[in-house]
Image: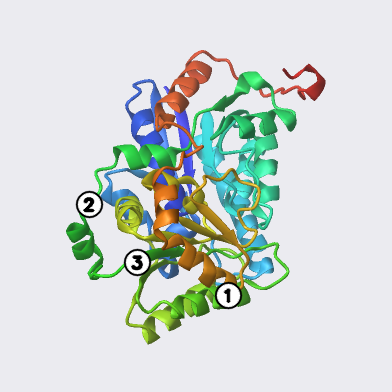
Amino acid sequence: MKKISILTATRAEYGLLKPIIKKLKEVPDFDVRIVVTGAHLSPEFGLTYKEIEQDGVDIDEKIEILLSADTPSAISKSMGLAMISFADYFSKLNPDLLVVLGDRYETLAVCCAAMNQRIPIAHLYGGETTEGAIDESIRHAITKLSYLHFTSTDEYRKRVIQLGENPERVFCVGAIGIENILNEQLMSKSELEKAINYKLDKPYAIVTFHPATLDESTSANQFEALLDACKKHKDMKFIFTKANADVDGRIINKKIDEFVAESDNAISFESLGTKRYLSAVKYSSMVIGNSSSGLIEAPSFGIPTINIGDRQKGRLQATSVINCEPITEEIDRAINLALTEEFKNKSRNTINPYGDGNTSIKIVEVLKDFLLGDKINLKKKFYDLEVCE
């Protein structure tokens, strides 16, 4: 049997990997191991590894790397802990493949350990650009460490090839978030209200704001502007999902707690989980913040997205996305625009550029082909653009 190790460090990451995990486990020739790290194991971020266990997914190993601080120094130290800890894990398990998703700093450190162990890496969602975050550099670095590449659009596939990866190892498969929307049995609105213990008797917004790690203005100032805009809309309710374990993430989460404590129209969660989150988006009036979910999942519901600042700058966008600067007046104008009937209709008719929802089966078929056919050769040649079609 071929051993496949699948890495997950955050709630959002696991929600996207879940369909792939399920389908890989159905392949008799694969021994699938889930390794959990990062924010999953932190009480401060909701101990979200429990959501994995509740789904009936066995966790092969829990590896703690997160420090109780989010300074640049602490992030670097967490990366160091990840390399040390995963060096031991990979030496013991020696998997035939490591599957990773996205652009987290933990993922980069784990990929470095896998590279040294000569473990092939399959990377989901290279080629994307997010100019306002350090994730941009991390994502491209992981691409060069990886052997197999799964992108969400053709444009991103071309960009991975532009980085020197052979087109025969780069596959456009669409976004798994779309697959979750089409296949997850979502809650009714009344079921959602019971699940979150909160009455949704007014128009409401889902708010997710992560640190913009390359912006000149601080994440705290940007988030204060967002909260000030929310204060102008007493006729709405706000469901906050908390920030990742990035630099300044704890500052944002502290401000969420303070805002919710002072407001009678807001509630917050460390993690809603895939089912509750997608159900909440389905019945919402809009998604606000700077999360990729607003660009990738929300358009499939026909819901307006207010994308704040540069964190997601460079990603493909549907016509349901309103971009604005992290300034209170601009965010307020964007909220008012999203509430108009004209923009609601525009959002309902938008076309999502991120695929048809058949992502996981495409990925599994490629992995079967390469692993079971013994097609992996880690001696990669740089693919020069002049020979690219």
Image spot of residue 204 (x, y percent): 35, 66
Left or right of 365? Residue 103 is: right
Residue 322 image point, x, y percent = 54, 57
- Horizontal arrangement in the rendering, residue 136 relative to residue 189 (left or right): right
Where, quadrant-wise, is the N terminus in this rendering? top left
Q: Nearer the viewer, mark 1 or mark 2?
A: 1
Closest to the observer, 173 or 91: 173
- Seen at 41% across and 42% down, the residue is 349
Please identify, in this view, whether the residue under mark 3 or under mark 1 is nearer the observer: 1
Disc 3 designates what residue?
204
Tell me the element at label 3: strand
Q: Which residue is mark 2?
A: 187
Amino acid type indicated by mark 2: Met
Q: Secondary structure at mark 2?
A: loop
Q: In this figure, which residue is indicated by the disc labeled 1?
A: 329
Residue at mark 3 to residue at mark 2: CA–CA distance? 16 Å
- Packing grade of label 2 (10 A; few <14, some 14-19, many >=20) is some
Single out the residue that lies furthest toward the top. 373
The amino acid on which the numbered mark 3 sits, given as a three-letter code, is: Tyr
Q: Answer yes or no: is residue 151 visible.
A: yes
N-term mark: 3 or 1: 3
- Rate crowding at label 1 as few (under 14), some (14 to 19) or many (20 or more) other CA atoms within 10 Å: some
